[in-house]
Amino acid sequence: MIKAQARKRAVVTTPATSSQSTTSHNSRAPSQLSDLKTSTVSKILSPVAHDDQCLAFFFHNYVVNNTKFHASISLIGNEHLLASIRALSNAGLSKYHSDIRLSHSARHQYVQALKLTNIALCDTKSAIRDETLLAILVLTSYETLTGGSDRSLEAWIQHINGATSLLRLRGIEGIKHTDGRVLTMHVIAFINVTCLLNDLPTPTFIYDLQSKIFEFLYEPESPAAQYQQASLQFADFNHAFHHHLFNTPEDVMARATAIEAEMVAALVNMPMYWKAEAVSSAIMPDDKILKGGVPDFELQYTDQATSYIWNSFYSSRILLRQAILKTVQCIETQDSDVSKYSDLEFQCRSIMRDCQTKILASIPPFMRLQSNTGFLLPGKRNQNPTNIVGLRTLPDASAQTSKTDRELVPEAFVSDLPVMHALGGYGFLWPLFVAGYCSTTTPEILEYVKDIYQKLGKEMKIEQALVLKDMLPSISTSN
């Protein structure tokens, strides 16, 4: 529970009468008047407590539903959540102000948050509370923001593994209310990334949870829902492919093609606001890097979340086509008649190059330009809470508007818990990684991706980008 720091209230004295004021004014020297003004202002404008600054920074920069009052922050038993928020906010403030003292404070709060969260996890009732799961997600964001080493990447994965264990422990009871569903969907997205990173299959119970969550939707056929289902299947394919669990090469290609078809189908009948607009680039690459495959246009999306879904889609298609391409190349080493696969190889490379180009074109200009803007905060989308019920529009609104034109409003906007959105630029980290190391990458694209990572790490202060940048050269060499 937040214990509000005691602050002295300014003592307001009874104002002097007109005659007294005139006499007093005329009798004071200029220096005395200056002292009086300074003293009066200092009493009225008392300093803002650091805890208040932390909370303000957290809600303004990291929370989707920041227009609501979130009582959970100040309730007894949520000290671990508050410590996690303090850690992330101090880390963000330290980068915003380039203040090493705040960085030390953030690290101290992080250690405290780990200690308090572990205590909460030791109690069965506390462990399954929404606030405990949220605390772990906040700690995950802390590692993303401050993680400038391989160790921090491992710590990030450990937090996701901990959240996965909590989802299993919470079971179906954990998704019977809005807060739990929003948190669970957030964790499932992270689980998908870690499974792909470590060539692991999607845990079976995750499919069950997601299916149950979809039962709460008016429109389970929404593009986001369908795509996420296919994305979980992709993790299973990735695991089977890298562990040689398919019986024949034809099985590999058939399964990859089927998953890709599901992903494409999920994003066919999308709402209008999901579509990107292609515009001329704010910075024109020189002829050399243009010939190397760097795009000369930009893709602008309506909001941050939509761009993240599309980039996840493009990176997944690249990896699926990469698997097909490698399988074909393996067949060709054992078959003298390689011409029958030439069309398939050409198709794979064409799709991979197209998706690679779209990932690079979706990177906002400020990530590609040298600037003195310092820490760039996440973009925010206009939030209109009108007619919000869960993850969809109201039925009467649905009847008046075509399916492809209306906006499906996230349940996050009505959650009683703070709902984290991605740190500015974080959603581009892994798609960029795929674009930087796949087999269609050119030296010019590689250097371009590394330059973006450098800006994400140094200017936007997302240190995990620097770790990924250093991983690229060796991986690219192996491709």
Image (cartoon, rainbow, N blue to C red):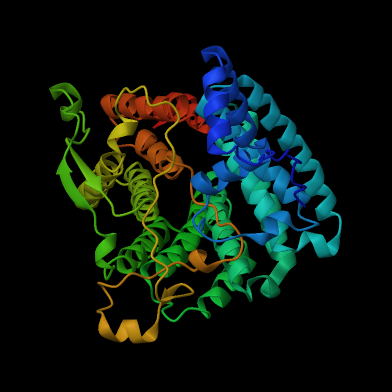
Where residue 229 appears, as percent x and y from the top left, is 46, 67
The C terminus - image quarter? top left
Q: Residue furthest front?
A: 19
Give residue 438's quadrant in the image: top left
Query: Could you tell whether 232 is left or right of 312 in the image?
Result: right
Out of 166 and 109, give the one closest to the viewer.
109
Residue for point 65% across, 55% down: 134
Front residue of 106/43: it is 43
- In screen coordinates, is 174 left or right of 474? right
Front residue of 184/3: it is: 3
* Place of residue 209 in the rendered image (x, y in percent of width and height, measured from the top left): 60, 71
Q: Is residue 278 left or right of residue 469?
A: left
Q: Is residue 369 visible?
A: yes
Asked if residue 146 shows in the view, the reply is: no
Q: At 78% across and 38% down in the image, what residue appears?
A: 112
| Residue 379 position by quadrant | top left
- Which x, y percent locates residue 383? 40, 60
| Image label count | 0
Residue 411 image offset from top left, x and y in percent: 49, 69
> Where on the picture, by quarter, is residue 369?
top left
Residue at point 25%, 72% (across, down): 405
Query: In the image, is residue 368 above or below residue 180?
Result: above
Q: Is residue 457 above or below residue 237?
A: above
